[in-house]
């Protein structure tokens, strides 16, 4: 009997790559996305790359609980992978109510309707941002949490809501996946990161410089306490990340557990620039400027809990990540806006 999985935010970067992996594993997938920060073209690509299972797409605002209920009325959903949400750190500082309303109400609607329909399996897209400024490196799941912006606080609040639900009813089986820095793209070059406007994140900005959409990169700080003075992060290939969601889904057990999805390896901004130049054959001009507010020197995952308990490990290295990012960007210089029709 094919299992049906609801993937919210499934037109987005990580959600679409996870939907492809689910389909290839012969799950049926229901994608719910409001397309506020993604393209419906991604759904067509997911369908073409997926193969195995069936795909249904609903353009839906998850802050409307009646619309959420309809998803469960219409499809035999057995588990939910929840990506949908606003995720720009800087924007969350400017518009906190918008972030709290969207991220929290949509999640509470989802969890309420899951319980109403006896659906108890939940995988949540959380973030390493819940750790705030880490006291120890690499960061274990037992590290203190303390978000430093409204976006991160919505992730932390949702984690705590999940913990409270699991404590109240032992039918809940929940995994909270704390991502480090997702990058890369599907090997076909047909699916990848397609941020609206000026990219907040490093790798899409670097790739837009490489493809000629932007003139120069600004490196936020060259005096961090790292091997070359630029910020260090734990970059993880989006397909490895997608596989982590399937591993979590297929090992769910009673209760609510948090897992770091990272590689445990750090790369600096200058490492990213030099590797991107190697894989693209393009020069990536940059200026080192002042630090970005809210940044930290180093973020690095201890992924051993996920390795051991989920039987999952990220195995694509930085060169593979940026090779796949470049293939996507060079094939689609304007992202999904680039594809014909
Ligand atoms: C990486 C490094 C920057 C852009 C963010 C969110 C986090 C998560 C992942 C959602 C840092 C430097 C960046 C640029 C630069 N998102 N940089 N020039 O900040 O580690 O994490 O994305 O869950 O919540 O905070 O990622 O890609 O923005 O920055 O020098 O134009 O690149 O200073 O050292 P970050 P990032």
Image: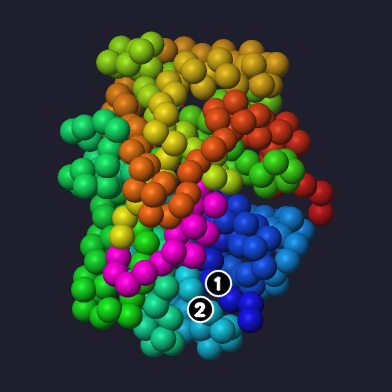
Asked whether residue 260 is in view, the answer is yes
Q: Earlier along the polypeptide chain: callout 1 or callout 2?
A: 1
Give the quarter of the image for residue 24: bottom right
CA separation in Å, label 1 and label 2: 6 Å
Q: Residue at x 48, y 49 (%)?
A: 312
| On screen, residue 247 above or below 168 | above
Q: Looking at the rendered structure, which numbered label has been put on residue 35?
A: none
* Badge 2 element: strand
Q: Magenta stretch containing residue 242, yes or no? A: yes
The foreground one among 276 and 259 is 259
| Other residues around mark 1 within 10 Å, as few (<14) / some (14–19) / many (≥20) | many
Q: Residue at x 41, y 86 (%)?
A: 118
Ligand 1 within 8 Å of the CB at mark 2: no
Q: Looking at the rendered structure, which numbered label has been put on residue 5?
A: 1
178 with respect to 321 (left or right): left
Which portion, as a residue range, is magenta?
A: 241-256
The picture places residue 280, in percent across and down from the top left corner, at: 68, 21
Does the CB distance between marks 1 and 2 fall below 8 Å?
Answer: yes
Kindly identify which residue carries mark 2. 78
């Amino acid at each position: 009997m094919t299992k049906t999985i609801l993937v919210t935010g499934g037109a987005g970067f990580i959600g679409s790559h996870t939907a492809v992996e689910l389909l290839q594993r012969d799950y049926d997938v229901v994608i719910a996305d409001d397309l506020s920060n993604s393209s419906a073209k991604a759904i067509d690509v997911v369908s073409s790359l997926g193969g195995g299972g069936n795909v249904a797409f609903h353009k839906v605002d998850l802050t409307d609980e009646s619309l959420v209920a309809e998803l469960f009325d219409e499809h035999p959903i057995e588990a939910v992978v929840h990506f949908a949400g606003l995720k720009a750190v800087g924007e969350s500082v400017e518009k906190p109510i918008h972030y709290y309303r969207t991220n929290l109400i949509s999640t509470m609607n989802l969890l309420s309707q899951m319980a109403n329909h006896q659906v108890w399996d939940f995988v949540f897209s959380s973030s390493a941002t819940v750790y705030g400024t880490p006291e120890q490196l690499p960061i274990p799941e037992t590290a203190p949490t303390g978000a430093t912006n409204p976006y991160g606080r919505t992730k932390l609040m949702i984690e705590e809501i999940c913990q409270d639900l699991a404590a109240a009813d032992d039918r809940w089986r929940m995994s909270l996946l704390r991502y480090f820095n997702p990058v890369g793209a599907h090997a076909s070059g047909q699916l990848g990161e397609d941020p609206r406007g000026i990219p907040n994140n490093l790798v899409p900005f670097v790739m837009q410089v490489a493809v000629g959409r932007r003139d120069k990169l600004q490196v936020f700080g060259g005096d961090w306490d790292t091997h070359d003075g630029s910020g260090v992060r734990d970059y993880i290939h989006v397909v490895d990340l997608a596989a982590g969601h399937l591993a979590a889904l297929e090992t769910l057990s009673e209760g609510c557990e948090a897992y770091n999805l990272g590689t445990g390896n750090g790369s600096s901004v200058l490492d990213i620039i030099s590797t991107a130049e190697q894989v693209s054959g393009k020069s990536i001009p940059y200026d080192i400027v002042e630090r970005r507010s809210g940044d930290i020197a180093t973020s690095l995952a201890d992924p051993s809990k996920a390795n051991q308990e989920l039987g999952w490990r990220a195995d694509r290295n930085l060169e593979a990540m940026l090779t796949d990012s470049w293939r996507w960007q060079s094939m689609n210089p304007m992202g999904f806006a680039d594809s014909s029709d």
